[in-house]
């Protein structure tokens, strides 16, 4: 089938084909049909980090690099380098706290955005 | 060559589905399902179609499976009736918003409560705002023809919307009717091979469908659906003309019967139009200038065609087989009356709600409507705008 002629929003398929062409300044005729997105892996560009009320922080000394947090994280926000815990992807982490809950070494704390991460000294007191 | 056969409406629709040979049919197999799906599942079982038949656990799932199949790129159908359509409600809106050309016949039956299974348009009228195209069928022939045309209308690149093919529950769906069926080759050529422009299983062109759409996009995408509905009017007419070439039967947005010189007209959907045509013949013999307007498409609503067809009449009665509880009559009444408003020529428009829960519309009832229209034309006065036909007062 060829692109339609009678329906204005289908005429602009060529323009709207790439996801970059989707932005909230475009008139309805130029947006992709039904909001379809033609770029794979585009959820990366949708930042969900500002949904967070609690923020996970990593206690490097306690971490045993078992990577259970990496497996459980529903938003793929645990960044692993060379098979070791590296950092959190705060642009996408929604602060659900699953990582802190499943961590067997209690190496992840959930704090408010305003709180400073616990100092190393304080963390050691619990041991 | 055309073949004249005797089939029930359900059989006629199943026959059309067999000849269309869709890729996927997803349907709930139990009450309130119609025999359409039962007949069709026989065709699947006997290897007469190539269709993947998905028996699902509810109508909500039936339309959900249809959405999945259509997104994947399959020519997809489902079928339901009454409460089943009500349960499907949520996903019908999604199918139309995702612009999926799913075709589904609906045997129009009452919605509970009180519990009732008989003919009534309450089910279809519940989905007039869902973004699906709604075609209505006077008899088994039209139901069969509408099914075949629905595929082309739904899949047209200007449209890409689900199409609901309505036929009256029991009156059309279960009654034996004589119709002409096309041969398999003609239907196959008419519907053609479905080549969706974009679909999920197209691995070379990745696509995300059914995405989250916030306040900065939702409104624009809704507007696109309206544009598709506007485009559908021309497509329905074009496909109808093309269908006439292969079948000899013309189809448009509306059908008019003896309306050209009429002073009075009734507007009604589905099988009741047949009864009204009979009454018109009788009254014409007595010298009354009466006619019938039968919208074939109710969504999109052919307001221009309706106002043009009715601009010469003096009084119109819109007959609704559904109630809106607005206290201003039935759903079609509101739309027809609004369509006539801009004519500014003082056509008297009244409403009759009739046949709820399967109550028969008798020929005398239609005659009574025309007699009351005659009174209105003579007196120039409308006493009651909303009336109930065949109700025990």
Image (cartoon, coloured by chain):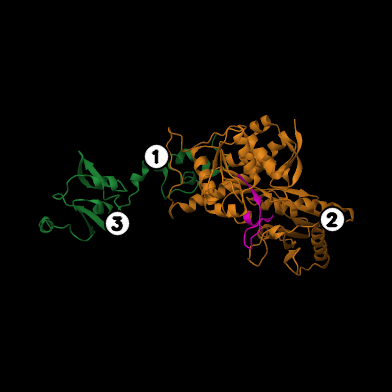
Chain colours: A green, B orange
Q: Position of residue B338 (x, y in %)?
A: 66, 59
Along the line of sight, the residue nearer the viewer: B272 or B190:
B272
Image quadrant assignment for residue B9:
top right
Q: CA distance from mark 3 to mark 1?
A: 27 Å
Q: Which mark is residue B124?
A: none
The nearer-to-camera label among 2 and 3 is 3
Can residue B235 be seen by looking at this rendering? no
Image quadrant assignment for residue B372:
bottom right
Where is the C terminus of chain B found, in terms of image quarters? bottom right
Where is the N terminus of chain B found, in terms of image quarters? top right
Magenta residues span: B104-123
Q: Read off the chain for label 3.
A: A
Q: Relative to residue B393, is residue B88 depicted above or below?
A: above
Secondary structure of the magenta portion, mostly? loop
Q: Is residue A72 left or right of residue B384?
A: left
Q: Read off the chain for label 1.
A: A
* Disc 3 crowd, CA 10 A, few/some/many (<14, 14-19, 20+): some
Report if residue B29 lies within the magenta region: no
Q: Which residue is mark 3?
A: A52
Q: Is residue B160 left or right of residue B190?
A: left
Name the element at disc 2.
loop
Q: Which mark is residue B289?
A: 2
Along the line of sight, the residue nearer the viewer: A74 or A87:
A74
Q: Which residue is mark 1?
A: A39
Q: Position of residue B212 (x, y in %)?
A: 43, 50
């Amino acid at each position: 089938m060829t692109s339609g002629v009678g329906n204005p929003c289908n005429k602009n398929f060529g323009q709207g084909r790439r996801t970059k062409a989707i932005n909230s300044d475009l008139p309805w005729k130029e947006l992709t049909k039904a909001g379809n997105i033609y770029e794979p892996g585009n959820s990366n560009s949708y930042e969900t980090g500002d949904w967070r009320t609690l923020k996970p922080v990593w206690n490097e000394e306690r971490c045993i690099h078992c990577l259970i947090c990496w497996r459980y994280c529903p938003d793929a926000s645990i960044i692993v380098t060379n098979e070791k815990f590296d950092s959190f992807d705060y642009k996408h982490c929604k602060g659900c706290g699953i990582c802190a809950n499943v961590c067997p070494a209690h190496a992840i704390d959930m704090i408010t955005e305003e709180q400073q991460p616990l100092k190393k000294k304080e963390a050691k007191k619990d041991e | 060559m055309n073949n004249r056969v005797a089939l029930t409406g359900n059989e006629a629709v199943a026959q059309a589905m067999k000849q269309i040979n869709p890729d996927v049919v997803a349907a709930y197999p139990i009450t309130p399902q119609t025999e359409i799906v039962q007949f069709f599942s026989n065709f699947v079982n006997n290897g007469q179609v190539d269709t993947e038949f998905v028996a699902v656990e509810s109508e909500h799932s039936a339309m959900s499976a249809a959405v999945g199949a259509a997104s994947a790129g399959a020519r997809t159908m489902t079928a339901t009736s009454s409460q089943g359509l009500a349960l499907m409600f949520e996903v019908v809106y999604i199918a139309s918003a995702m612009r999926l050309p799913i075709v589904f016949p609906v045997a129009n039956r009452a919605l509970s409560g009180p519990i009732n299974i008989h003919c009534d348009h309450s089910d279809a009228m519940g989905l007039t705002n869902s973004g699906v195209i709604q075609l209505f069928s006077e008899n088994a022939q039209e139901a069969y023809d509408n099914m075949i045309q629905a595929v082309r209308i739904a899949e047209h690149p200007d449209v890409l919307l689900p199409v609901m093919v309505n036929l009256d529950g029991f009156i059309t769906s279960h009654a034996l009717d004589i119709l002409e069926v096309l041969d398999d080759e003609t239907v196959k050529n008419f519907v053609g091979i479905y080549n969706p422009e974009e679909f999920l299983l197209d691995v070379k062109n990745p696509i995300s469908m059914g995405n989250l759409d916030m306040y900065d996009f939702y409104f624009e995408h809704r507007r696109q659906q309206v544009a598709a509905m506007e485009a559908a009017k021309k497509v329905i007419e074009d496909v109808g003309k093309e269908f006439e070439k292969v079948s000899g039967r013309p189809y448009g947005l509306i059908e008019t019967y003896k309306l050209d010189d009429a002073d009075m007209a009734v507007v009604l959907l589905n099988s009741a139009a047949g009864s009204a045509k009979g009454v018109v013949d009788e009254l014409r013999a007595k010298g009354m200038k009466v006619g019938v307007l039968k919208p074939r498409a109710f969504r999109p609503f052919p307001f221009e065609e309706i106002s043009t067809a009715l601009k010469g009449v003096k009084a119109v009665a819109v007959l609704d087989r559904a109630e809106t509880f607005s206290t201003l009559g039935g759903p079609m009444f509101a739309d027809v009356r609004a369509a006539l408003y801009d004519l500014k020529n003082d056509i008297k428009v009244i409403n009759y709600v009739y046949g709820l829960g399967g109550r028969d519309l008798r020929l005398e009832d239609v005659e009574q409507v025309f007699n009351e229209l005659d009174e209105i034309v003579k007196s120039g006065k409308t006493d009651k705008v909303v009336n109930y036909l065949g109700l025990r007062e």
